[in-house]
Image: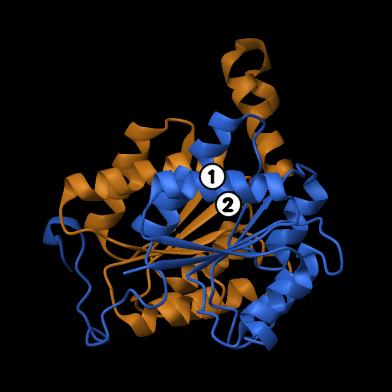
Chain colours: A orange, B blue
Amino acid sequence: MPLQILLVEDNPGDRRLTQEAFRDINPLIRVYVAHDGAEAMAFLRHEGAQAAAPRPDLILLDLNMPKMDGRDVLARIKEDEDLEDIPTIVLTSSEAEADIVKSYQLGANCYLCKPMHFDAFYSLMKSLNDFWLTRVKLHADDREVGQKASLGRGLPTAETNFSP
Amino acid sequence: MALEVLLVEDSPGDVRLTREAFRAANEAVRLHVATDGVDAMAFLNREGAYSDAPRPDLTLLDLNMPKMDGREVLSRIKGDEVLRSIPTVVLTTSTAEEDIAKSYELHANCYFSKPVGLEAFEELVSSINSFLLVTAKLPGQGNADASDTQEQGPEGIGK
């Protein structure tokens, strides 16, 4: 898969909208979903059933979630030598100054507020794709894997080479 | 409200291009320039001639500079309790994987390589402006009374 996003979101409606938006905006993006912070950390650390989880190119992180909230996930990612370099974007309905400041202090790469209406949400996801996944330089090693994989997908004979 | 942007850049040509591009992109941006890492740290810590310097809403940081390079500036910003919440974006000619990886490790908010060509450079500044300064929420742009807002997604699809 060329570009892998880990979406950490407990709200089923928001999960579905985000997945649908990305499917439409950029078919090369694969969205993985974690339903709470604990699941996100298991995914990132390849624990249990997530042993084969890929390293995401980008993380979209909700703040208010059960079990382990987004602030805690963010702190753990940014204190972990193996994970701290994964761009992590807070995507929340909170517009509280305290949440914004705290997120940047914890090392969030960016903070986005979920708009109330679907059209605005869709265009936010489109801007996110255009900016973070097109303009911003992500890790070249991740990107190269992505480019090879996308080449492979275009060549039927090479398809099997890219199975996990 | 003015948006304070600190550009840390030793090349006068790039300073000029960036200034012109921001002027075209967003009239609210006030661009401050530091020409090396030492100058940048003095600005951020309000030392000497910079005692009245504003806290930047965004810092754009070149990597290769005299005196103190961008990696060192980045590491000092992100290692400082007070400064670390300032979004700090690397803007450099380097496309070296080593520089990209190191910058993210040091908690750069994002990394751009300067494009070749005036038009491409203007487009990049315009997209930095529209995404990071207009679309994203920066410290100081939040709602002070909304600390316990109820989670509510698009169209109010709730829990």
Q: Residue furthest front?
A: B49
Q: Residue furthest left?
A: B156
Q: Work out whether residue A68 can be spotted.
A: no
Which of these two is toward me, B60 or B112?
A: B60
* Quadrant showing the C terminus of chain B: bottom left
Left or right, B99 with respect to A148, comes to: right
Say which amino acid is labelled 1.
Gln
Secondary element at tag 1: strand
Which disc number belongs to residue A144? none
Label located before the other in sequence (2 or 1): 1
Residue pictured at 77% horizontal, 44% vertical? B94
Secondary element at tag 2: loop
Left or right, A67 with respect to B34, comes to: left
Say which amino acid is labelled 2.
Pro
Which of these two is toward me, A16 or B90?
A: B90
On what subunit does the disc labeled 1 rest?
A: A
The number of numbered badges drawn on the structure is 2
Q: Which residue is mark 2?
A: A56
x and y percent of residue B118 in the render? 59, 32
Report if the CB atoms under discs 2 and 1 are less than 8 Å apart: yes
Q: Residues within 10 Å of mark 1 (few under 14, many from 20)?
A: some
Residue pictured at 31% horizontal, 54% vertical? A15
x and y percent of residue A162 in the render? 66, 28
Please tell me whether residue B14 is drawn above or below residue A154 in the rendered image.
below
Q: Residue furthest right?
A: B67
Which of these two is toward me, B91 or B1?
A: B1
Which disc number belongs to residue A4? 1
x and y percent of residue A68 in the render? 44, 79
Q: Work out whether residue B154 can be spotted.
A: yes
Left or right, B19 with respect to A13, comes to: right
